[in-house]
Amino acid sequence: MQRGRSWFGCVPMSKAALPVERDFDLPAVKPSWPSSVSDGGFAKGSIDLGGIEVRQVTTFAKVWSTTQGGQDGLGATFFKPAPVPTGFHALGHYAQPNNRPLFGHVLVTRDASGTGALLAPPLDYALVWSSGQDDGAGFFWLPTPPDGYKAVGVAVTATKDKPQPGEVMCVRADFTDACEAEESVWSNDKDGFSATALRPAVRGIDARGVHTGTFLARSDVAPASVSALACLKNNSAAYTSCMPDLAQVNAVLAAYSPHVYLHPNDPYLPSSVTWFFENGALLYQKGNPTPTPVTADGSNLPQGGGNDDAYWLDLPADNGQKERVKKGDLAGAKAYVQAKPMLGGTATDLALFFFYPFNGPARAKVGPLTIPLGMIGEHVGDWEHLTLRVSNFSGELLRMYFSQHSTGAWADASQLEYLDGRPVAYASRHGHAFYPREGLVLQGDSKLGVGIRNDCAKGSRMDTGGGRCELVSAEYLGAAGKVAEPAWLGFERGWGPREEYDIGREINRAARILPRAIKERLAQLVNKLLVGEGPTGPKMKGSWRNDERDP
């Protein structure tokens, strides 16, 4: 889907343009996706939710904007979708912070059931808030739905006159699902007003809630809760019918597979799982002192059972071999890909999992000092991942998720760095958490300058294109998809022994010169951020069947 230009009017020469005043386009030309071998509808521009047809609109007309407050103090802009395709109806307007290029969408709908009963205009609109009483101000209106229907978005006008009844439509309740706040777009503390982007409250491979692209407006005068609005719901029996087939998945990976920069001072690099097994990885069983070498394909690994500590993997017993395996094998490293439906089958998530034989020790920052934390943070076996979210309407990359230890963060496609038209990620030194930019990210108290360091820089680069992505799971394709999961994917125990540290002793040894209060603060951070869940494989991640975890 080609993104059109949004109208902002003329920007005075003396005024620097805000980022939102330009559209974002992906740096590479979107490819022509292979035709589906079935009746699939990937990247066809339209999706049937079981009676309601939806399309994704990415062109907008500005209604009102402010350059005060909000993210980076640059304000926000509020838009209406324009043009809306003939026969379709808007469900709500779109809002975006001004600190990034314009890149978003809202869904528009038409009743394709033949009944004409799935959509209805609101009975009325309630004024939530206005920035003033003169024309040219922003007026925010919450639709009043008829009985049995739900409002899905709000309308914004530049006059005090209520919107026309058909400005936005309401949806029959059985075609809606619960939503929740996702991101604050803009707020005005003086009047208690806030605009918040929305997303489905339940998200996972079996969830049916659809991201609509609308937002919630509320104020002290009209304190509407999130329950005042809903998202769409995919009621189609074949809700994955617009997912990409195998050839299309490979084409999407070819278009968007990321470049990964490793830190130049990190000796612990990724490898393929096969290389790890072939170079002496050992399987231990609780109560048995004699380990078993792992076969190259992992076929002798026990399956299922959860992470019950009955089995675990470890490095080779020979010290020389152990040190060599710790350093990985970047030349043969792979990204192992899970393809899954998300947002009611309107998006495809491609999770790229990276394996490291060893995770290095952590380092702390205390003011200007960098303090190595001894053995704290070291463990055998490390799995981290990046997730590409792609629109099933267009095949366009929407955003990318960066796993960061036990949590992570999304970044919109407009906020990513690109190389040769494909996104870039940075793996932190020793810990291998992913970030969208190089530099230091401090986990802890940034105001006091006390925390765990995550340093990213351009060292060796792993290009996951050119066949280095291996698709290991795509359950939605079924038997016809012919994606055979490798045996090692079913190993649910630890990819390394559970590590136990004497936190206080290690910190006292590493940070002898620090005041006691700072040492105690470091110990708290270590316990919170670095100690706990052992290294388990991709299928044991909560994101395997659910959405990614927010901070």
Image (cartoon, rainbow, N blue to C red):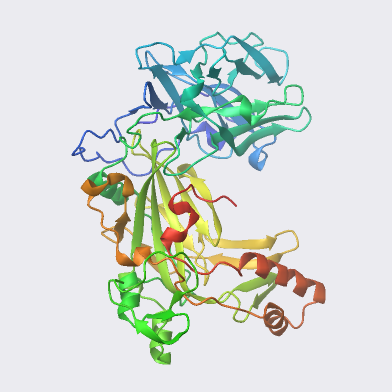
Q: Is residue 275 toward the left or the right of residue 503 in the image?
A: left
Where in the figure is residue 327, as x and y percent of width and height? 42, 79
Residue 274 quadrant: bottom left
Where in the figure is residue 65, as x and y percent of width and height? 62, 26
Residue at position x 29%, y 41% from top?
244
| Quadrant assignment for the N terminus | top left
Residue 506 quadrant: bottom right
Residue 232, relative to residue 399: is it above or below? above
Q: Is residue 232 toward the left or the right of residue 463 in the image?
A: right
Residue 288 quadrant: bottom left
Depth order, front residue of 73/310: 310
**Number of marks in picture:** 0
Which residue occupies the extreme left position in the image? 37
Residue 246, relative to residue 434: is it above or below? above
Where in the figure is residue 388, as x and y percent of width and height? 41, 48
Residue at position x 73%, y 18% from top?
132
Residue 236, relative to residue 326: is it above or below? above
Where in the figure is residue 22, as x and y percent of width and height? 49, 33
- Please indicate, yes or no, whether residue 97 appears anywhere in the rendered image: no
Depth order, front residue of 420/434: 434
- Please indicate, yes or no, whether residue 396 appears anywhere in the rendered image: yes
